[in-house]
Amino acid sequence: MSEKIKAIRGMNDILPGESNNWLFFEKLFSDLLISFGYKNIRTPIVESTSTFKRAIGEVTDIVEKEMYTWQDNNGDLLTLRPEGTAGCVRAMIEHNLPREGIQKVFYSGPMFRHERPQKGRYRQFHQIGVEVFGSMASKTDAELLMITHQLWKKLGLNNITLEINSLGSDVSRQNFKEALVGYFSKFEDKLDEDSKRRLHTNPLRILDSKNPDIQDTINNAPSLIDYLDEDSKLHFIELQNYLDSLEIPFKINPRLVRGLDYYNRTVFEWTTNDLGSQGTICAGGRYDGLVEKMGGTDTPAAGFALGVERLLLLLKEQNKLVANKAISIYIVTDGDKAHEKSLSISLLLNEQFDNLVIYNDLSNSSFKAQFKKANKHNVDYALVIGEDELLSNVYSLKPMKSSDEQLQLNESELISYIAKQT
């Protein structure tokens, strides 16, 4: 017997029973972004490997261990995108979009990282990313945080904390890196192998280590805030003032550095204690030098990414999963003419209402069996079309979630009745 086919480990199906929550969330968030003037951008899932190496940095876990990379028939190295910012920046440069003014864009879709699958973290995972190109203002950072805070409110989520920090300018980061190297070199015998390797390549990443054995050493390390240049200090103070005026609570986390090399100045994470160790649900910051680093003109930029799987886990954990708010109707039919009429009726209703879900029976089974299917779909109403209804042009509308009486309605009365329910 042949081996049973199945999905690749860490790459999961999103089944019909789950997809309503995905669709609701994606629409709610895209509508929210559009309402604040953001526009959708769609970039390829596959990019040149060099795009990610230049953007993310050679000495990162993503580039060193996690990317899905292969050589194509032309000998070019290609990679499944592990994150969305690099491809978005590449598109900005290639099409010279910043010349048209400030660009406020968002995207969504699958990302790929070869890491150990665990709850809320998969090898194929889905992100919504938001990016702003062309604005240096701290107001930009504040708007991004305002939008995410508004999203939590619209979803009814709670127990979410905003942590912020500033990484300063390239000069202040370099001074801080030198201080870190001097500090951690004194404790090199206590560092794990990853931290030893990073000590002379990317010492900031040591601060991001989750190894409990070196947390005391990390906690006593110099603080980046003490090395900030004056402009970065002012930018960070302005951001805090914006957050205070918006009444968005936050705490400053001086150890927050983010895992990607391209960040400067503002970095932030939205975290929760409701998902165990996988507590970050949204993260981002400012990356003013990335566009130039990747070959474009000097263009300030900021953005964030949100993990859809992790957010849906949080919705489930807090019992905030979305119910389908649309009215639903199952059309129960008997006979060929009734089947024809059911399609024309469903088309008529679809043209009249945007928030109506219509199930046409496709089984040619008995009335009793069709009503069972209607119950299985948990519909609000069953619309009955049989010989009597065809002769009289009056249809039977049966409430399926209450003991209310069955209604006899012609087409115009049916439309009027549904209009009152939606």
Image (cartoon, rainbow, N blue to C red):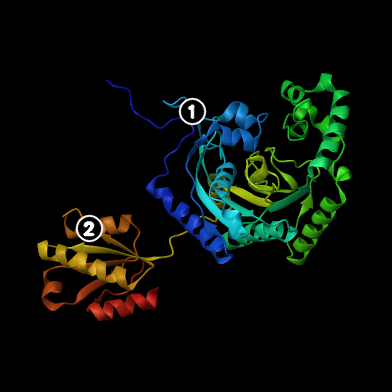
Residue at the (44%, 27%) spot, across then down: 72
Q: In the image, what residue type sits under mark 1?
A: Asp
Looking at the image, tell me whether mark 2 or mark 1 is earlier in sequence order. 1
The label on residue 76 is 1
Residue highlighted by disc 2: 361
Residue 14 spot, x, y in % from top left: 42, 44
Q: Is residue 271 visible?
A: no
Residue at the (45%, 55%) spot, across then down: 23
Which element carries disc 2, helix, strand or loop? Answer: loop
Q: Which of the two marks, 2 or 1, is nearer to us in this view?
A: 1
- In the image, 389 versus 60, the foreground residue is 60
Count of all numbered marks drawn on residues in the image: 2
- In the image, 383 versus 12, the foreground residue is 12
Quarter placement of the C terminus: bottom left
Which element carries disc 1, helix, strand or loop? Answer: loop
Residue at the (32%, 54%) spot, across then down: 376
How far apart marks 2 and 1 lie (CA) works out to 51 Å
Q: In the image, what residue type sits under mark 2?
A: Asp
Residue at the (55%, 54%) spot, across then down: 106
Q: Residue 413 falls in which quadrant of the image?
A: bottom left
Q: Is residue 110 above or below residue 150?
A: above
